Image (tube, rainbow, N blue to C red):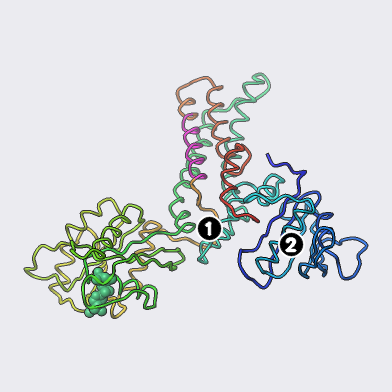
Amino acid sequence: MIDSSETIAAISTPVGEGGIGIIRISGPAARPISLKVFSPVRPLKDLEERRLVYGAITGPSGEGPIDSGFLVFMKGPRSYTGEDTVEIHCHGGPLILKKALEAVLKGGARLAERGEFTKRAFLNGKLDLAQAESVIDLIRARTESSLSAARGRLDGLFSKKVNGIKEMLLDLVTRIEAELDFPEDVAGVTEEFFTSESARAREDLSRLISTYDEGRVLKEGVKVLILGRPNVGKSSLLNVLLKEERAIVTPAPGTTRDIIEEVLNIRGIPVRLMDTAGLRESDDIAESIGVKAARDRISSADMILFVIDSSLYGEGSAESPDSTLLKELEGKKVIVTANKSDLADEAALDAVKKRFSGQNPRFISALHSRGIEELKDAVYEVAVGRGRSVHERAAGELVANLRHKLSLERSLEGLIRSMDAFKGGLPRELVATDLRWAVDRLGEITGETTTEDILDRIFSGFCIGK
Ligand SMILES: Nc1nc2c(ncn2[C@@H]2O[C@H](COP(=O)(O)OP(=O)(O)OP(=O)(O)O)[C@@H](O)[C@H]2O)c(=O)[nH]1
Ligand SMILES: [Mg+2]
């Protein structure tokens, strides 16, 4: 458990050079410690809350000065952590910040652990656990949609959803328990009531669990691997998607060897796009290493843009190695991307449609930038599921975290067990026990019933100063 009698401090701005850098101090001694290392230019009677004070940052016994800057005091509980907090704003030089932090530590603070400010905010009831976890999602968001989803979670939209279901189950279980405790005084839970309430909760839980794919994709993005034979236009596709000449393109097969990785935003989803060496047997050492690297990425890719040269198809064209390669990708999400459609005649296009009739091929021309918007739509659709679209408002209600999904699933299991027990005419105690269990699993999400080691694991994924 966190010892909240300790005062913690850390540099809260990113490492490196910046216009300003901020040191955050939180805990009961935040104020006295900060005043040991900070001398206001104009003497103060007392530190006013939330007012910037200009002064010199010094060593803990007035040595220095290290820098000049501002200090701001936020009195608990009206602060991020809920404790007395001070921020010292100085110039954003790594050495300045290091020395200022050292002065604060010498003055009596201890270095904060990863995520400890946010952990304290959680322990002091400023945020529930799901909200606290979304702080990191907010910081890491790279697209508008990921950002608004994280923002919604931080504002409590997701927690509200979970709590809504929890209230429903809790109401049911307290009624059953009351009936067990005071059989004479309390009206029993009728079969009709139990059946309708539990079915409603089950429906809500299942629906929430089913939003995980969308939520995860928005939060973490998708890894998309561009694969195909040499010279089919993989690098050209990467370039046209990125709208820049990122990869070298030549008319000769075997141009790309290294994996070229770039992040782009497709319809709000962060996409990590990887161009690879064309798949073929080669005597060239560098090329065959590239081919192996490409194959090694298949298992970890979320989706594959399998590029073919549609101009090579047509009446009487031999069985193409494309089909063999496609077999290697069985079980993966694949979009057959029929490139060079500008060179393909009617017969060739028909042949491609026929050969890949099960895969719904998308026709593009990377050279003339044709079919690219439709291909992006396809990527989006394959990533989040057909017919779904993430609405900005609702994005904060999606399940985005595997931990949350597992807890929801376990809660659903408990609920179903209790429904079976009820239906099977088992003692109401058993029905209640399973329901309680289901409620507690939901409590894990928001942090009411979360164990210390889970908390540690969650917050250790944060950075220091958060
Ligand atoms: N006509 C036409 N040519 C294209 C198209 N896409 C790519 N090309 C040409 O095809 C050749 C190969 O393109 P790349 O993008 O280097 O192909 P690649 O699949 O990356 O090739 P490797 O890296 O060697 O495997 C280049 O001359 C491109 O200009 C297209 O849509 N239409
Ligand atoms: Mg290439």
Classify 450 as above or below 273. Answer: above
Residue at screen point 41% across, 67% down: 262
The part of the image, by quadrant, that contains residue 193 is top right
Classify 408 as above or below 60. Answer: above
Query: What kind of residue is marked 2?
Result: Ala
The part of the image, by quadrant, that contains residue 339 is bottom left
Magenta residues (range): 403-417
Q: Is mark 2 within 8 Å of ligand 2?
A: no
Rendering coords of residue 392 (x, y %): 52, 63
**Is 440 within the magenta?**
no
Q: Circle 2 — which element?
A: helix
Tell me which secondary structure the magenta stretch mostly adopts. Answer: helix
Residue at screen point 59% across, 59% down: 151
Query: What kind of residue is marked 1?
Result: Ala
Does residue 58 appear to the left or right of 311 in the view shown?
A: right
**Ligand number 2: quarter of image:** bottom left
Residue hosting label 2 = 100
Residue hosting label 1 = 394
Does residue 69 appear to the left or right of 378 in the view shown?
A: right
Pointer 2: residues within 10 angstroms few (<14), some, or many (20+)? Answer: many
Does residue 386 appear to the left or right of 289 in the view shown?
A: right
Q: Is residue 361 visible?
A: no
Rendering coords of residue 13 (x, y %): 65, 63
The front one of 388 and 195 is 388
